[in-house]
Amino acid sequence: MQTAPTDTQAAALAKAQAASSLQNIALTLFANVAIAISLALLIYLREGSTPILWWLGAAVAFALLRAGWVSHLKSSGKIERNPHRVLRGLTIMAFASGALWSVVPLGLPVFTQAHNVNDVVFIMAGTTTGAIIQSLAYSPMAIAFGAPLMGATVLRMLLSGGDVGYIVAADIAFLTVMLFRAARLGERNFIASHSTTIAATELAESLASANHTLERLVRMDSLTGLANRSHFRTAAGAACAAGHGVAFLLFDVDNFKTINDTRGHDAGDRVLQTVAALLRSACGDDDLPVRLGGDEFIVVLQGADVAGRAVALGERLMAALLRPVLIAGQPMSVSCSIGIATHPQGAIDLEELSARADAALYRAKDDGRACMRVFDDQMQSALTMQRRLDVELAAALARRELHVEFQPQVAMATQEVIGFEALLRWKHPCAGMIPPPDIVSAAIRLRLSGQLTEFVGERVCAFLRALDRKKAHGIRVSINVSPREFPIHSPAQTLKLVTERYGVDPRRIEIEVTEEAMFDPKRCADELKLIDEHGFALAIDDFGVGHSSIANLMAVEIDTIKIDRSFIDGIAGNRRDQQLVAAITAVALPLGHRIIAEGVEREEDAQCLRMLGCSYGQGWLYGKPMKEDDAIAWLVQHRNATAAVEPLPRSA
């Protein structure tokens, strides 16, 4: 049972919440003012309504008042002396701001007109979403702002009458509940994270005078009580060298990230503890259960018949997990994917057996998860191919055996080509076409990421110069880089040197990074800053796969958001995916982000995306990936075809 925090811990948590809230409020106030100006100008230019300008003056004045008060709080030291009072003040200010914004839908007569109602609904929802995202450390502040604003918006929609108004009011009410729930979960995760840090600090201080306890903790995972990675390497290395038979049973919890994101990290920790207890009870006396880190576990088995014992252990574990586990009194279904590698006799290298267990685990995941796979000859062939790629990639790069293809990106309403994405290809003489992720992974392992980025950058620059010869100066080309490359080299610096060598404007190149870069902003901050300083555009690729990335939209200078293809295929008939895309556009469009849908293959999906506010698409509906010359020829033909179907100008 979780113990209540001490007074010291509670004060430290309150200080952390106040500091985080004050740190984020400057951007929130700026966004408030920017959206208020946009809304007022939109209504004034359309209707000539003077009251909206009075409201704008009040909104700007109140934002400046809040900014001055926040500056005073930061310099006065009140956060350290009385953080709870600071949080109460922030909540009151947030409520006053929400009440002021609620005047817009309810107090201004101009919003009795249907088209203005649509404007205010869009802006109010986006404003509330942004405020909640910036207030995840302390949910009462977010709720205090959002409650009057969203309540007024719902009431305005109800007063507008008609079935459409009622439906939109219901959707907004549902969105409000979900946003408030997200704010509560965000605060809960914030508290859990800082509580762990505080508790760990106190524990470390107490261990200074208890060396025997420290020695035990060095070998044990503090959360589960199992052996940790350090002890695993020592014990497993000795078992592999002994030559009496050894097996590794490697597994992790399926969809554990979803559990953390939907139930909170406390629930995630309890799942890990429950799984560890089941594992400990399923293991024999001579087996060594280990938590490697995160949700990954391994069991080391030694002696006779290790293959049969490992399979039997895996079956016992999976059978135990068939019964829902109780988390905070609520049943939760938990499953795991298991990979087994065995070596019945003779010494074997620890890394070799670990690689085989990894390969078996990945196969279990590829086969749908919640299953067990034993390393076999087919996996050995795949592992051999991976090692072959590691050996041959450097030479293939030097011989220019790799090539780049380009897939168009278009404005879905007009079919105008606005860009291309550069896609890496390697047709291996034996293995055929190698998937780009395998190439990138091999390059990272071999420290060849810099050379690979330079090669792609050279092909992109050559393609841009070819586009210029066809008078296509406004087209941008995007390049994919992995955040895993950042500790190895700087893609931004590499591409900067390439563009200088080719005389290409860096603004013509957009660097795409997967949203994992937003999950660890500290590790990626320097590289993201360089991308901006060198003039490259920044796109977040495969957006939507990660659950917490929307909260970081305002923390990173983003030009483009690319929605992952898994949410696009069949979106015309999928209400849940439609709601996700609508939520992304509601947050991203007011911030000035361009949104591109990946994997558009059906016209009905394209039409649905346009209605949801997504203007740009990429996929086989518009064009497949093509080699450089084919892409240029396709562009010329596409432009001619588009020009041919444009309506003729009306005669005078």
Image: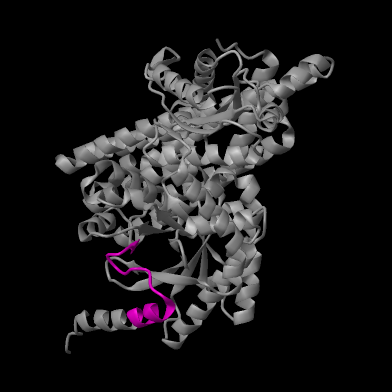
Query: Residue 173 vs residue 372: left or right?
Result: left
Residue at (54%, 16%) from the top-left corner? Answer: 283
Q: Which residues are magenta?
A: 616-635
Instruction: List x then y, in percent, for residue 141.
Output: 51, 31
Above or below, 526 against 342 in this view is below
Q: How many marks?
A: 0
Relative horizontal placement of residue 447, taking residue 460 as reference (left or right)? right
Residue farthest toward the left in the current orientation of the protein: 162
Image: 377 above or below 7: below
- Residue 532 visible in the snapshot: no
Vertical placement of residue 607 versus 263, above or below: below
Q: Nearer the viewer, residue 329 or 17?
A: 329
Q: Position of residue 401 (x, y in %)?
A: 52, 72
**Quadrant in which residue 482 is drawn:** bottom right
Foreground: 15 or 514? 514
Q: Please, is residue 308 above or below residue 628 in the view?
A: above
Q: Residue furthest right?
A: 209
Q: Residue at x 41, y 86 (%)?
A: 470
> Seen in the image, is 6 located left or right of residue 130?
right
Please state, as top left, top right, bottom left or bottom right, where the N terminus lies in the image: top right
Image coordinates of residue 465 in percent, x first then y, are 50, 83
Residue 626 magenta-highlighted: yes
Q: Is residue 409 at least partly visible in the picture? A: yes
Q: Is residue 329 magenta?
A: no
**Colour treatment of the image:** one colour
Residue at the far front in the pictured view: 345
How far across and how far down the image is residue 87, in percent? Answer: 59, 27
Q: Nearer the viewer, residue 471 or 17?
A: 471
| Screen quadrant of the C terminus | bottom left
Q: Is residue 200 left or right of residue 610?
A: right
